[in-house]
Amino acid sequence: SVNPDLASERQTASFSVEKLTALLDGGAEQTRIRRAVVEAIESDPVFSRENQYFQTQNERYEAAVRKAVHLQKKMHEMGWTENGPEYKYIYRALSGDVAFLLHRVFMRSISVLGSDKQIAKWIPPATQHQLIGSYAQTELGHGTYLQGLETTAVFDIATQEFILNTPKISAMKWWPGDMGRSATHTVVFAQLYIHGKCYGIHPFIVQIRSLQDHSLCPGVTAGDIGPKMNFEHIDNGYLMLKNVRIPRDNMLSKFCEVRPDGTYVRQGSQKINYFTMTTVRISLISDEVLTPLMKACTIAIRYSAVRRQSKLKPGEQEAKILDYQTQQEKLLPQLAAAYAFHFINDYLQELFDKGYREIQRKNFDMLPELHALSSGFKAVITHHCTAAVEICLRACGGHGYSLLSGLPSLYTKILASCIYEGENTILLLQTARFLIKCFMAASAGQPVPPSVTYLAAVKPGKCPAKNKSDFLSPDIYTEAYQHVAVRLISSTAAKLQDLVQSGVKKYDAWNQCTVQLVLAAKAHCHYITVKNFAETVEKLETKAGIQRIMKHLCDLFALHGIFSNTGAFLHDGYISAAQMDMVTSSYLDLLAVIRKDAVPLVDAFDFTDKSLNSALGSYDGQVYQRLYEWAQKSPTNKMSPAYERYLKPLLHNTLSKL
Amino acid sequence: EALVLNDPDFQHEDLNFLSRSQRYEQAIRKSSLMVMKLREYGIADPEEIFWFKSFVHRGRPEPLDLHLGMFLPTLLTQATPEQQDRFFMPAWNLEIIGTYAQTEMGHGTHLRGLETTATYDPATQEFILNSPTVTSIKWWPGGLGKTSNHAIVLAQLYTQGQCKGLHAFIVPIRQLGTHEPLPGITVGDIGPKFGYDEMDNGYLKMDNFRIPRENMLMKYAQVEPDGTYVKPVSDKLTYGTMVFIRSIIVGDSARSLSRACTIAIRYSAVRHQSELKPGEPEPQILDYQTQQYKLFPLLATAYAFHFVGAYIKDTYHRISGDINAGDLSELPELHALTAGLKAFTSWAANAGIEECRMACGGHGYSRCSGIPDIYVTFTPSCTYEGENTVMMLQTARFLVKSYTQVSSGQQVSGTVSYLNDLSRQRIQPQHVAARAVTVRINDPLSLVEAYKARAARLVEAAAKNLQAELNHRKSKEDAWNRTSVDLVRASEAHCHYVVVKLFTAKLSEVSNAAVRAVLTDLCLLYALFGISKNTGDFLQAGILTSAQITQVNQHVKELLAVIRPNAVALVDSFDFHDVHLGSVLGRYDGNVYENMFEWAKKSPLNKTEVHASFHKHLKPMQAKL
């Protein structure tokens, strides 16, 4: 039975939860397919995550491999294919707890970077899992800065082979997933040398383990890099290569080729090497970033409706902690952010699908903009959502700290997203470089890509809001965000110019402005997110109360952003001190409004209890009972040898020894 | 230090490679040894025990923490002489291992909500202990799950049909000799947590469990054989203990953040990345402005919190004499102040540790960096000993009270004395505007004034909003709740001011000129960075102009460059031994990469060349496809 404290929350929903779920899924038919996939996976005991919190690293890894293998069977059984509508829901249904994720990246990189001949050779056996791939880019001493990689691939004309080497310890490949124990092959990024000349970083397919007995190939040293904050189920690995020879055909050569005589031929843009990374950045947002945040919100908000603490009114029973303004101020902005980023993710996906089609036609015009957007949004969304999950975790007090709440593992998982696929600060600086360039172009009257046309139309002025309800107008706050973005970008551009004109070297000037540049890039992304949210809300159908509640969330997201960064808006007086008080007051009023729909808003994310895997966040709200039952399953509650070995002597013998 | 580090008995495999049960076992083994060695070496001074213990367990929690830190001291302060005779020596000799069971599954910071009952039965002269609901199960006490055989249990006392509120009882929970739970007692470990792997945090459920009347701690309140209840004299005394524990958390904030800074700054000096100047080798990442901007303000914060922690501890020692003499006049302010500072410093340290980890990129995420461990061990301090938001609101209550006193014409003293100025400002409307140009951003004392003005403004705004809510509504609690976001901001501003003030005050006490110079830079950085992160408050109140904010931002960046040459020396000064730091990235010798490789080779997944999963799952699959 459902805890009455949660049941009552659902009776007062101002909108149709089912309709909102369909909106998030992109249609009722999608919802149906997703639920069918989830049901098929969750009813299969092999995919159970029931004991996950009690398992060791070895057990987690083995379970993930077992699931990956079983998944192949399951897909076959269910008639799911990689191009079918079900495919994208499988990962969500598994909660990512499965091995061979890098295998997909391996295949993707061959599809994008390989020649037609290479695709024909490698993709079929990879699809059949006759080989298991990984993707080896990062090195022990080198991360985001690709040019700094030290692994070498020297072309040997005599044998028509590349000789791969790890010249020193910092050049060892480090971190690639699935490489520590599982992978038989990997795409290695290395500096290409022909006749002693370096041609920069190129991708090579390298076999690292025997297809017969899985032992390491000659010249290969590989293993697991040891325990991490999370991803115990993934064997992130290291790889050292010593004179490993691979055939000339193993260099992925859609865009660059080494001819038998050693001639280096470039075809198309070199930038394409980055496109794989760029698309990975966007494709990870939904599963790796938004889903954990939505789960964390679901757990924290349901728990806050069940947990009671202290009294709000004398004589009454203890209040739900969700009724405390401070608790609302912690959780509801995170809920709004989950929706805001869901919608910006839809926008980015659409843009990237378009970009992908263009690139396949060898039209690279959209690349700089796509690169800037993917970098900036990857950084902003991962950073924001990571912080948000941690807020949810800490908002659950002591019980949030138990692994059984599900929150610590959601947090340690999502926070890895801030680092992989490009360290966030560096990504923001890449976006900033694009913005400065576009700003200069726009100032000179040249055309700029669609997402930055606003830089050309700079309007000086002040915020026209006269009372606090004016701040519930999307035009008012969207313009405020735009103003701040333009101000930060233009003032940093001016600063850079001043420095250069005063004789400072360009790269020094850049380093001196990096703190501001990061702020400018963030402001740009924040503005686009708010604008997109407001535009999305406008297009929603008005029935079933969906548009109204989404409008509230959009307002909350926008005003929370101003409230927590008042200085940026007050700086040049665009928003006055008196207007800022209106913002605060409007913002705090909204908390109480959204509070009423908080539980239905997380119900709409439609996570099953199994997928949440949380003693605190279940749909029925039977928090304490579940916590108690789960704790009893802990391995520590089996008789520990610690008592016989150490405690008993301590309890009985210390006296005699004294 | 050397005593422990050179003792082969305290060596063991890297904890990162052990399961939770193994880690618990190691901790118990070391704690048992530790107790015997302490006796062997005749170490009895609390300070020395603390250092010995922190070296044995490398700053981690351990199963006997609650026995040593809560059970024994509670016996000393709350037991009668007869009870001490019965329990203290056996507990001192570890025949009795105890814990302190307060928190329940459904109830934390709000003590009055606890549900466990102790009902007095005059017929048998016993208390009958019960956990009447699931929510009343004791949950979280350290050492309760597997280690302890006794617990001090906090329960609602019922006698002669009346509830007399919370009282403490000594409850035996496991059979001496077999260590089996006693009949009527259900006890166990609450399962895996984010951190605290060594600690068996436990649950305890009692069903009509009877203990003798003499097991209620009766130094203050008493129940007589016939059931008559005798009230305690004063309940303010518990304030002293709370102040003391919070002062420890402030010190812990400083220590934990210092450790994370040490690792991140040393690693940033070893790690090279990208290029700053075309054609030159990859620079140390510590040379990037963005990296300095992440780390140096945290370094300054770590120093600031060290001084704050020391200040509170000194103040506590200074006035604890007064407390014993019955003079409790300074206690309310100190109590309110430490509540806020506990929250302020633990929040900042919590976020700072994560920033340090993030600043180490991918390798920070590996357990070998040691920072994940610092984080998971530290982060519960935002919750325990008073949840931080609740703590901030306690401070706010004091601030509002002081503000109300000032409004009614009284003067207030201590750290809130700046509120006295508010009334003057109202008489001179020019005052605030005039103040703007007087802030000198190179002068810590002047910045203290700026923080003071910000705190005053936010306290006033919160108090006024509270008043406005009160005018609209009948319920005081409702009005308070609807103002609580403002109130928390006011408390934060107040604490921030106190920290800047204490750091600044410390500068004049430093006699060595070079040390004073570098600490002055750190102090300025701390204060200016705080302004640049909260520009809105200073702008909105007219304390600083936009032009000054731009100068502040510029000066922060200049200070980063000034501190850069001293950065490693400043973390070396924290003087953490490598063993204590527990980090491959933060090693004193900086030999990071080769040691990461050595460390990884020991990972449990690498125990065999070909993992068992290959034969079990991979091979059959490949055969079938």
Image (cartoon, rainbow, N blue to C red):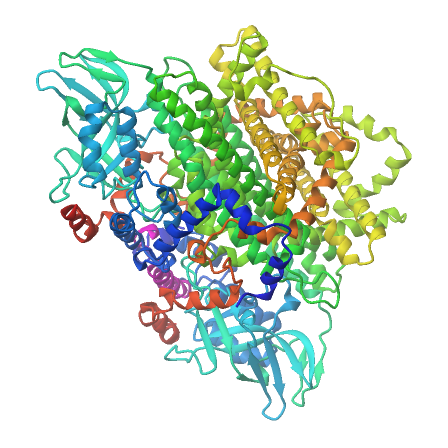
Residue at the limit of the structure toward the bottom, as seen here: B123
Query: Which of these two is toward me, A370 or B155?
Result: A370
Q: Is residue B219 above or below residue B305?
A: below
Residue B77 falls within the magenta-colored stretch: no
Toward which corner of the image does residue A352 lie, by quadrant?
top left
Is residue B428 in sight in this rendering? Answer: yes
Residue B156 point in image, percent of width and height:
63, 75
Q: Is residue A620 above or below residue A452?
A: below
Q: Which residue is depicted at the point 37% across and 80% down?
A: B177
Left-right relation of A53 to B163: left
Residue B181 point in image, percent of width and height:
42, 78
Q: Is residue B595 above or below residue A33?
A: above
Q: Would you say the magenta stretch is mainly helix, strand or loop?
A: helix
Toward which corner of the image does residue A148 lie, by quadrant?
top left
Left-right relation of B76 to A345: right
Q: Which residue is depicted at the point 54% across and 36% down?
A: B298
Query: Which of these two is toward me, B190 or A303?
Result: A303
Is residue B61 in sight in this rendering? Answer: no
Residue A471 point in image, percent of width and height:
72, 34
Q: Magenta region: which residues?
A: B11-40
Q: Quadrant of the C terminus of chain B?
A: top left
Residue A8 point in image, percent of width and height:
62, 61
Query: Which of these two is toward me, B611 or A499?
Result: B611
Residue B14 falls within the magenta-colored stretch: yes
Q: Which residue is depicted at the point 20% across and 35% down?
A: A124
**Count of marks, rendered view:** 0
